[in-house]
Amino acid sequence: MTTETLHFGPSSSPLLGVYHPASGQRKMDQAVLLCPSIGHEYIRSHWAMKRLANQLARAGLPVLRFDYHGVGDSSLECADVSSLDLWQQDVVDAAEELMFQSGCRSLHLVGLRMGAAIAVLAANKIPNLSSLVLWEPALHGAQFLRNWRSMHNKILDLWVTPIRTIADDQAEELLGSLYQKMLLREIEQVEILDHHFKDKETVLIGNRVDGNASSSSCEYGRKTERVDDPDEWDDSRYLETAWLPSNGPKAIVAWCNNSGLVAV
Amino acid sequence: MKERIFRFGENLSMVGILTEPTQDKLLPNSPIAIMLNAGIVHRVGPFRLHVELARSLAEAGIRSLRIDLSGLGDNPTRSSKSTLEEVALEDGLWAMDALEKQTGVGRFTVIGLCSGAYHAQRFACMDSRVVSAVFLDGIAFPTPQHCKRLAKKLWNVRFWRNAVKRRWLKLMPIDSAQSAGAKLAETQFFGSNLTREESARQLKQLVSKGVRMLFVYTGGNPDFSSSLQFEEMFGVAANDSLQVEYYSNAEHTFPLVKSRQRLVGRMVEFSLEPQLGNKPSTKHINFARIQSDCDSSPVSAAPP
């Protein structure tokens, strides 16, 4: 499948993206923007995001996947990022780039884990958003960080010799990356379910979305779809193991193919 | 420092990221570094190691290209009758050809971790344009002395504490026997199939060709336990051109920020040595970023 790797966004600090044009006949005036997770989860899920992008493109939907500032091949270091605002703006810039590349007028936004939270925060800044897909979402930022810290501490505890990692007033090392404390404080405040999406279709897809999410999903017009995929995000043994889901991508392709269709 | 998308290979179907220093910092005659995939991790490297290295090399004046081999990361699988090893070698050849054509520089440093080190070793043997190489946790063979050193660990209280915790709390990292992804990596991208004799022969060939080499091994490699082991394995002693270091307190993929910074600093230093009369120098390296809390036991010729 043909893809195009490209730089976009601010010329002084470009972002890296990979554009997957729709293969064959494009069926609708819609495209899909994939928002990855961060840190080690970004690397673990890179293959899964690529595979999802290929599946969506084969289904007739152009796709852009991209790296936030300080993540993957994009400019800056993770330790340079002081606020979620920067990553929200990255989503907005990526949405513009996708509309430019594809010529489509509306988008589905698919966010994985912390990418789901970033997508939710950015959603109101993106015009013509067709739907939000929150995939294995990190629903509660504080819980997300608690789990990361727990995994980090387990790994350090089993190090060959006693060892400490960076943790001071300014920054904290977590699972291979250095994060500014200001950013972590913002992540701690994230509560995806507090956001109301009156005019946007939203679906939560993942292993854990039938718990807290389902009770409020009807009230706010959200839908949930529980899928059985490897659920190992909080397990330090899988820190470097590729995450290879099979059911989540199928559900996402089906959703994007069937929701809010706009005839070309 | 500037990063741009670099296309190469058949119909320019392959993609890498070329990182270049600003014109005032560029060391024009320095070999271009080529970073190869570590296992199935895409071109950013484990914990973004390759990105950090590329940017540090650029700060020091050295160009680098990080690539995905065919079928990995963003690069397509090639449908050819070649074996995966032949495909990987061809990928490397294409990258070097394209870099030489675009930059006019026909000298390269190949850098790889784990399976990347195996591929780097093959590239170095195959193509005379490879003038230096960095092998991170590359090929290793247990030796009798290695077994004795491991036996000494049995007296270490922390060894037993960790072993008990791992077993009782089920905290063993998922290995290739349990993980489908890792299994795929092992079967399709990892296998070195090299005997110790063949490795030693290749090594001696590289030494005779004048290829500069840096071998870094970590405490995360179960087959390696001391920088002395290199000579035990291959019968080749370390020297200025063949440097061997053992980071006993670092893990295989350098997940800790400080150990990664230290490694990156060391690789930049190694790359700069020819420019600086073969004497490791701190001139271009921001050692303030590098806090040395990782053990290392270099047996390479010590700098003055």
Image: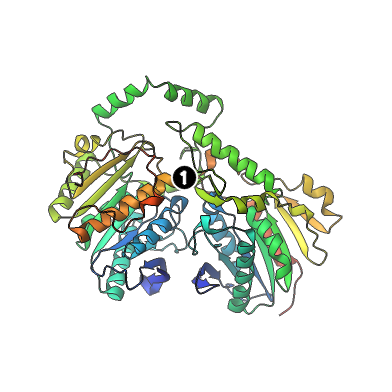
In the image: residue B18, left or right of residue A246 = left
Is residue B103 among the parts visible in the rendering? yes
- Would you name the residue on which mark 1 appears? B182
Tell me which residue sits at (56%, 62%) in the image. Answer: A68
Q: Is residue B124 positioned above or below A95 on the image?
A: above
Q: Quadrant of the N terminus of chain B?
A: bottom left
Asked if B88 appears above or below A236 in the picture, the reply is below
Tell me the SS state at disc 1: helix
**Residue nearest the viewer, comparing B242 with A59:** B242
| Picture quadrant of residue A101 | bottom right
Where is residue A151? Give x, y as percent: 57, 38
Kind of residue indicated by mark 1: Ala
Instruction: Give the mark count.
Output: 1
**Dot 1 alpha-carbon crowd within 10 angstroms: few under 14, some 14 to 19, many 20 or more:** many
Which residue sits at x=19%, y=37%?
A: B231
Q: x, y percentage for residue B164? A: 50, 23
Residue B127 shows in the view? no
Residue A178 in the image: state x and y as whole percent. Answer: 52, 50
